[in-house]
Amino acid sequence: MADEQKQQLFKDAMGNYPTGVTIVTATASNSEPIGLTVNSFASVSLDPLLILWSIDHKVSTIQEFVKGGKFAVHILAGNQQDVCMNFAKKGVDRFSTCEWSFSPEHNLPIIEGAFAVLQCKIFKTVEAGDHTILIGEVDDIQIDTDKDPMLYHRRHFASIPAEFYNQKK
């Protein structure tokens, strides 16, 4: 099988794998906020509390994320589709499209309205193909259990309300 064909099949398979959606933010060396939409997010460890996400080597802010030492992962709420799409675009002022502020604890840009926010310090980075994996140690957690997290499947967004899980069968 040709590499191009394998890559397309891989994209098709991964695009059909339901995932959560996050936005990862950090503060650049010039004190400006940076951020991007990320679905390569996973938990790693409970002791210590570790998560991971990966960033493409082509992303213009990769060095800011890798060398910055800290970042915030926003697990998006089901109603944040517009914010998600804006942070996936190139050449736009992403932070002008949402309400946000710097956290007092870590001076990280925090987007309002997320289901959860994990403020992390970099624990380790790993080079993997055309991406760098950033493993973060979670230092601060905020969660809004009144919200439902965003899901992504087959290029569509959705959320499943908590009531769905509370129904008796």
Image (cartoon, rainbow, N blue to C red):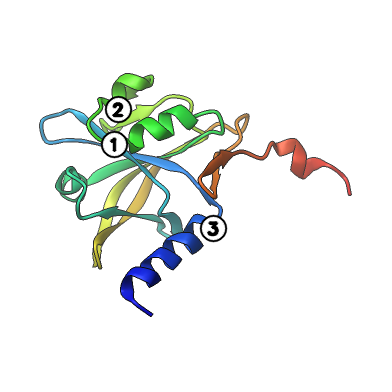
Quick check: 15 left or right of 161?
Answer: left
Q: Quadrant of the N terminus?
A: bottom left
Residue 36 sits in which quadrant? top left
Are the two marked residues, 2 and 3, in contact with CB atoms closer than 8 angstroms? no
- Alpha-carbon neighbours of circle 3 within 10 Å: few (<14), some, or many (≥20)? few
Residue 168 sits in which quadrant? top right
Residue bearing mark 3: 17
- Sequence order check: which comes first, mark 1 or mark 3? 3
Quick check: 21 left or right of 165?
Answer: left
Quick check: 150 left or right of 118?
Answer: right
Q: Is residue 48 visible?
A: yes
In the picture, the disc for residue 94 is 2
Q: What amino acid is at disc 2?
A: Arg
Are the two marked residues, 2 and 1, in contact with CB atoms closer than 8 angstroms? yes
Q: Residue at x 28, y 53 (%)?
A: 55
Q: What amino acid is at disc 3?
A: Tyr
| Relative vertical location of residue 109 with respect to residue 166 in this rendering, above or below | above
- Sequence order check: which comes first, mark 2 or mark 3? 3
| Relative vertical location of residue 101 with respect to residue 17 in this rendering, above or below | above
Q: Is residue 46 visible?
A: no
Residue bearing mark 1: 35
Q: Residue at x 53, y 33 (%)?
A: 77
